[in-house]
Amino acid sequence: MLGVKGAVARFFTERDISVDYKHNARSDDLKKLLADEAYQNIVVIGHGERNKWCARDGTVYTEDLDEWMNGLPKKKGYFIQFTCGDKEGKPLGYSVVEDRSKILGYTKPVHLGDRFDSLWGESLKGIEGLVNINEEVLAHPK
């Protein structure tokens, strides 16, 4: 959406990391990627929140990735969510990467103008405008 793929490619190629894309990814595509040690960085793009991503075949939750990562080595790279966010919950990539400071995403719902601003706005620098969402934030009673 609005050049997100280009921003992702730029983020990784500036770090000498090759980029592959899987369009219309399904949950089993993500599951296979988690098991493939050749891939150390993962980006999910689409609908979702801090603790979920809408794959082509249904919603994938943090608990799914926790289960899929059972017995697998953690990734050394980034886990980036280009989804809407929220302030509460366990991030989707929480059990995926060794360094939780490399879990990036949004902490609030994203509107078209926000997404445009974060990629090309003067106040933020591309995908680096995403924030670290490595800590689980619990809901507070009202």
Image: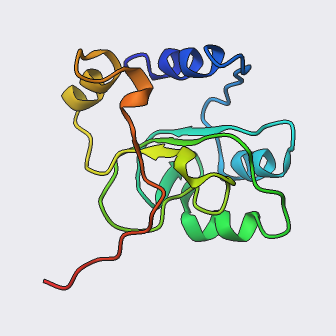
Determine the residue positioned at 36% across, 70% down.
Answer: 137
Q: Quadrant of the C terminus?
A: bottom left
Q: Coloured how?
A: rainbow
| Relative image position of residue 87 (x, y in whole percent) | 30, 60
In the image, residue 71 above or below residue 2: below
| Relative image position of residue 51 (x, y in whole percent) | 46, 61
Determine the residue positioned at 45% across, 22% down.
Answer: 4
Q: Is residue 30 visible?
A: yes
The residue closer to the viewer here, 130 or 69, is: 130
| Relative image position of residue 22 (x, y in whole percent) | 67, 30
* Res. 47 image quadrant: top left
Whether residue 20 sits left or right of residue 48 in the image: it is: right
View extreme (left): residue: 142
In the image, residue 1 above or below residue 109: above
View extreme (bottom): residue: 141
How many numbered dots are placed on residues in this image?
0
The residue closer to the viewer here, 46 or 110, is: 110
In the image, residue 138 above or below residue 12: below
| Relative image position of residue 26 (x, y in whole percent) | 65, 46
Whether residue 142 sits left or right of residue 79 in the image: it is: left
Determine the residue positioned at 31% across, 15% down.
Answer: 120
Q: Is residue 55 visible?
A: no
* Res. 11 image quadrant: top right
Whether residue 42 sits left or right of residue 53 in the image: it is: right
In the image, residue 122 above or below residue 37: above
Determine the residue positioned at 25% across, 48% down.
Answer: 109
Q: Quadrant of the N terminus?
A: top left
